[in-house]
Image: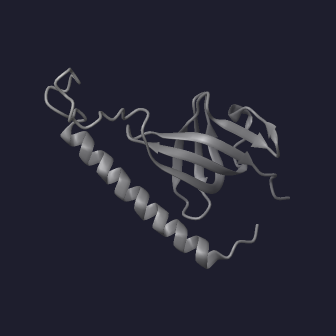
Amino acid sequence: MNVPSGDVSQEVVQLRAQVQRLQQEVDTLRRGGTATGGSGTGGSGAAASTPTVDPENTVVASVQMQGQVAAVSKDRIQVRDAETGDLYTLLVGKRTRALVGDKPISVQKIPEGTPVRVAFNYAADGDTYATRLQVYPRPR
């Protein structure tokens, strides 16, 4: 894959900085608690309260990267970022889709060392959830 490295590198740096800021905001919210408004019960007197955020279902950032599979287990996959070498542990669930070409594959059947493009979400609960893995043929 030949991609103009200047534009992509600059965009990746900007996206990583944005993700880091969002992670800091999530950490700040966690330390301060997640309850909002009065008693936190959402009762009948809460007409002007701020909506409550569900940290397990709130996506704070969506990321795509290219990398290489470092490890796979029943409910997780570890991918090493091809650009930075950082290791990401991503949760795998019912909504995770893995493809070889256009054919579905079980995430657990992807061997270590396989090049992939992965899309994942940073959730407000601090976890990262794999949404899509595109498996590439190994270079020969």
Tell me: 19 left or right of 74: left
Q: How is the image coloured?
A: one colour
Give how far across and how far down residue 132 sits, in percent: 65, 43
Residue at the image point whose x is 49% and y is 68% from the top = 13
Give how far across and how far down residue 66 sits, in percent: 64, 57
Q: How many numbered markers are drawn?
A: 0
Q: Quadrant of the N terminus?
A: bottom right
Give how far across and how far down residue 95 sits, in percent: 61, 32
Q: Quadrant of the C terminus?
A: bottom right
Q: Residue furthest bottom?
A: 6
Picture quadrant where residue 19 is located:
bottom left
Residue 11 or residue 37, whichever sits in front: 37
Picture quadrant where residue 92 is located:
top right
Q: Residue furthest left?
A: 38
Q: Is residue 139 above or below residue 37?
A: below
Residue at the image point whose x is 21% and y is 22% from the top = 41
Residue at the image point whose x is 68% and y is 37% from the top = 97
Q: Residue furthest front?
A: 47
Q: Is residue 52 above or below residue 88?
A: above
Q: Is residue 37 above or below residue 140?
A: above
Tell me: 92 left or right of 41: right
Residue at the image point whose x is 78% and y is 35% from the top = 104
Give how far across and how far down residue 63 sits, in percent: 54, 53
Picture quadrant where residue 124 is located:
top left
Residue 140 or residue 42, whichever sits in front: 42
Tell me: 54 left or right of 67: left
Residue 44 or residue 105, whichever sits in front: 44
